[in-house]
Image (cartoon, rainbow, N blue to C red):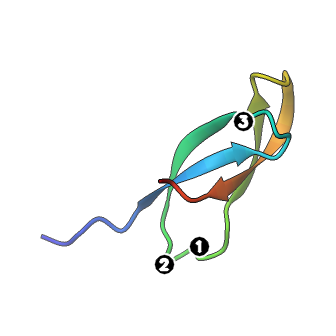
Amino acid sequence: MAKAVKIKVKMESSAGTGSFFIAEKNPRTHPEKLTLKKYDKKSRKHEEFVEKKLK
């Protein structure tokens, strides 16, 4: 059986609040860094979340 292709990445808020969530992505089809606009609970606004390394 083949290995799973998807990897887990940490999506961290660009507002500097420290909010984050975990997402999955396929690095073969999307090698660039992932950016999403999502709701930040701490700032209570929609902010841009950028991909960081998951330790």
Q: Residue at x 69, y 45 (%)?
A: 12
Query: Label 2 near label 1: C-beta < 8 Å?
Result: no
Horizontal relation, residue 35 to residue 11: left or right: right
The type of residue carrying mark 3 is Gly
Image disc number at residue 28: 2
SS of the residue at dot 1? loop
Marking on residue 18: 3
Q: Going from the N terminus, do you reach mark 1 or mark 3 first?
A: 3
Kind of element beneath mark 3: loop
Left or right of residue 11: residue 26: left
Report the amino acid beneath label 2. Arg
Image location of residue 17, percent across then percent down? 79, 33
Residue found at x 50% / y 72%: 27
Where residue 15 is drawn, which disc sits there?
A: none
Secondary element at image label 2? loop
47 on left or right of 7 = right
Residue 36 place in picture, x, y as percent: 74, 50
Question: Which corner quadrant of the image does residue 1 belong to?
Answer: bottom left
Q: Position of residue 35 (x, y in %)?
A: 73, 56
The answer to whether 47 is drawn above or below residue 11 in the figure is above
Vertical placement of 31 versus 47: above or below? below
Residue type indicated by callout 1:
His
Mark 2 residue crowding within 10 angstroms, few (<14) / some (14–19) / many (20+): few
The answer to the question of whether label 3 and label 2 lie on touching residues, with beta carbons closer than 8 A, is no
Compared with 36, 19 (above or below) is above
